[in-house]
Image (cartoon, grey):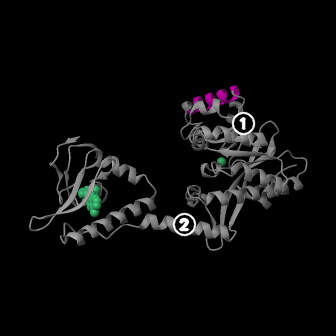
Amino acid sequence: MFVKKGDTIFKQGEKGRQAYLIEEGQVEIYHTLKDGQETPLAVIGQGELFGEMALIDSNFRSASTRALTDCSLLVIEKGQLVEKLNSSDVVVQLMMRVLIQRLRHQNQSKSGILLSEISTDLNTGDAVEKLKLENQIYQAFKNNEFVIYHQPIFNFAKNKVTGSEALIRWDSPSKGIVSPVMFVDVLENSSMIVPIGYWIFEECFRQYKMIKTHKPDLDFSMSINVSARQFIDPHFINQLETLYKKHNVPPQNFKLEITERILMEGGLILDLLAKCKEHGFAISLDDFGTGFSSLQYLSQMPIDFLKIDRTFVMNIQKDPKTEAVVSSIIFLAKKLNLKIISEGIESQTEEAIMRVLGCDYGQGYYYSKPQDIKTFLNTIEG
Ligand code: CMP
Ligand code: MG
């Protein structure tokens, strides 16, 4: 949008539908007092944004604006801005609302005019809940309340359990076993996942040795979930090496379960995956088919195992299209020399179908729910 020198862009007290980014020129932001006099608030230039406040808090324009020079402005619609804010972290949303409220108060006390009532109801609920949960997770970690559960992975060729997926659980003294849906998302999206992730590795290495002591002849492989944040931690590979050497366990018997989200982090990931493989770790692509599944990842990334998401197995008996998709995925995976693990197997029929379609391993309630290490040790065969 082009605005000529001296033109008003909008006036204080109006409703706002658009914000503006200055591509070229200068804009003056000012208040008009009761007697019609103007007081300048700011002069802003190239690259700066204005008119965002009324869009974010749905209140009236807090000031008037006019072009000090000829201006070229990029118009941003309310939807564009609000959409981005709404999809951001709840704590970021709260901070934004707080800052805008503070600015409105400051403007108001400077100019002495009341444009409109400034809402003090910030609706802090979600943000407070999230911050509280983060604190609780941190405390739980310090108090050693996290435990590792194992869900068996059944080997179709050998007809027995030859592995497990290690899963984090929160054993809270007050709440009992807390479901991972309550905290894993918050955990994985905070920097706490880095130290907690290393704790998970150490605990898995210790438990692997317990399993080997219990069943020395079993060629056992443990799958460990690695979140994107932990994977791209600059110390990840070195730390992993330190830990497996410290615990004296063979990396060949561990699979790193990563999701497609990690692969989207870009070129750097290819090197990291290659380094993990140099150390001997296998790579397993988790939840395949749910996210941004790109077939390109399958051919370009050094992956060894593919885990077909449980939603496919859930629908496979009802829906011939699902079966067509699953058998194509398996066909392709086989061509690429990947081994296939089917998640979510809950019945003998589902196992039979996945076997016929060419899966190599099964995981799901049909075999067992995730179990604590003691129970797990008692159920696996040698
Ligand atoms: P909005 O309230 O939509 O309309 C007026 C705009 O002026 C406001 O959004 C901000 O972009 C900007 N603005 C308000 N107060 C100030 C200030 N004190 N300094 C700089 N810019 C301001
Ligand atoms: Mg997993």
Residue for badge 2: 133
Q: Nearer the viewer, residue 239 or 187?
A: 239
Disc 1 marks which amino acid? Asp
Residue 170 screen position, x and y as percent: 65, 64
Q: Main secondary structure of the magenta part?
A: helix
Q: Is residue 153 left or right of residue 27?
A: right
Q: Quadrant of residue 267 in the image?
A: top right
For ligand 1, the image quadrant comes to bottom left
Residue 133 screen position, x and y as percent: 54, 66
Q: Is residue 58 visible?
A: no
- Which quarter of the rendering shows the N terminus? top left
SS at mark 1 in the image = loop
SS at mark 2 in the image = helix
Q: Which mark is residue 304?
A: 1
State whether residue 309 is above or below residue 108. above
Q: Nearer the viewer, residue 183 or 134?
A: 134
* Circle 2 Cα neighbour tier, 10 Å, few/some/many (<14 / 14–19 / ≥20): some
Disc 2 marks which amino acid? Leu
Residue 76 screen position, x and y as percent: 30, 46
Q: Is residue 324 magenta?
A: yes
- How far apart are the alpha carbons under marks 1 and 2? 36 Å
Q: Residue furthest bottom?
A: 174
State whether residue 70 is above or below residue 43. above
Q: Which residues are magenta?
A: 322-335
* Circle 1 Cα neighbour tier, 10 Å, few/some/many (<14 / 14–19 / ≥20): many
